[in-house]
Image (spheres, rainbow, N blue to C red):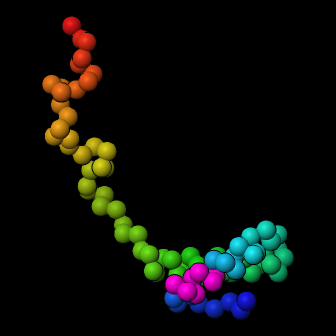
């Protein structure tokens, strides 16, 4: 398969299928070089097609978000305490 830029979802699917055929290639071989090239092309496409937004560094982590439904009066931790 000739290497080319991935522009559509169909191209992406074909590239992923081709990568599977090259997956066991040894580094430094022509097949290993082809695998590196195809993985780079897929990564480039995925970065453009499925961008991940930068995190808001000023927002609190979700795990630390206030939980209005949880407080000391309804906590299971207090059950059985004197």
- In which image quadrant can residue 13 be found? bottom right
The quadrant of the rendering that contains the C terminus is top left
Residue 77 is at least partly visible in this image: yes
Per the image, is 14 magenta? yes
Q: Is residue 29 above or below residue 63?
A: below
With 41 as the anchor, is 21 left or right in this view? right
* Residue appearing at x 82%, y 74% in the figure: 28
Q: Is residue 70 above or below residue 81?
A: below
Residue 80, given in percent of the width and then of the height, sits at 25, 12
Per the image, is 18 magenta? no
Residue 81, given in percent of the width and then of the height, sits at 24, 11
* Count of all numbered marks drawn on residues in the image: 0
The quadrant of the rendering that contains the N terminus is bottom right
Magenta stretch in the rendered image: 9-15
- In which image quadrant can residue 24 be found? bottom right
Q: Nearer the viewer, residue 4 or 56?
A: 4
With 6 as the anchor, is 82 left or right in this view? left
* Residue appearing at x 24%, y 17% in the figure: 79
Question: What predominant SS class does the magenta segment belong to?
Answer: helix
* Residue appearing at x 16%, y 40% in the figure: 68
* Residue appearing at x 26%, y 56% in the figure: 58
With 61 as the anchor, is 11 left or right in this view? right
Residue 36 is at least partly visible in this image: no
Residue 30, given in percent of the width and then of the height, sits at 82, 81
Residue 11, given in percent of the width and then of the height, sits at 58, 87
């Amino acid at each position: 398969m000739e290497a080319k830029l991935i522009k559509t979802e169909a191209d992406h699917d074909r590239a992923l299928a081709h990568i599977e055929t090259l997956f066991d290639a040894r580094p430094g071989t022509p097949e290993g070089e082809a695998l590196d090239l195809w993985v780079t092309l897929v990564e480039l496409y995925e970065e453009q097609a499925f961008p991940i937004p930068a995190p808001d560094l000023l927002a609190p982590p979700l795990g630390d978000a206030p939980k209005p439904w949880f407080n000391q009066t309804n906590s299971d931790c207090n059950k059985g305490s004197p």
